[in-house]
Image (tube, rainbow, N blue to C red):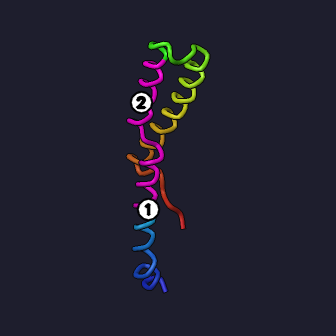
Amino acid sequence: MFVLDDLLFRPFVGIIDALHTIALDELYDVEALEDDLKENQLLYELGERSEAEYQRRKEELEAELETARDVHERLASGRVEVKR
């Protein structure tokens, strides 16, 4: 039974794990969030965004960026797994 599990199910778990990693990488894109922070700063400096809106958006983006960096750190260390 265990041999059958290894032959039939392990390849699917590997594929799901790879898809999971790709999805997390896309969902938590560190570079895109850093670009959004820069854009937010630029819009504020150009006067197209109020200080209150700038601060609110900056806090949101920094929180998202912290989460994204944590996810990427976990992916790099192998601590994110697909459980079956």
Q: Residue furthest front?
A: 48
The residue to which callout 2 is attached is 34
Vertically, is 18 above or below 73?
below
- Asked which quadrant contains residue 19, the reply is bottom left
Vertically, is 2 above or below 50?
below
The magenta stretch spans which residues? 18-43
Q: CA distance from mark 2 to mark 1?
A: 27 Å
- Asked which quadrant contains residue 22, the reply is bottom left
The residue to which callout 1 is attached is 17
Picture coordinates of residue 7 (x, y %)? Answer: 40, 81
Depth check: give the residue in front, 83 or 21.
21
Q: Which residue shows up at 46% across the image and 77% down it?
A: 9
Depth check: give the residue in front, 78 or 46.
46
Vertically, is 45 above or below 60?
above
Depth check: give the residue in front, 24 or 77.
24
> How many dots with numbers?
2
Type of the residue with mark 1: Asp
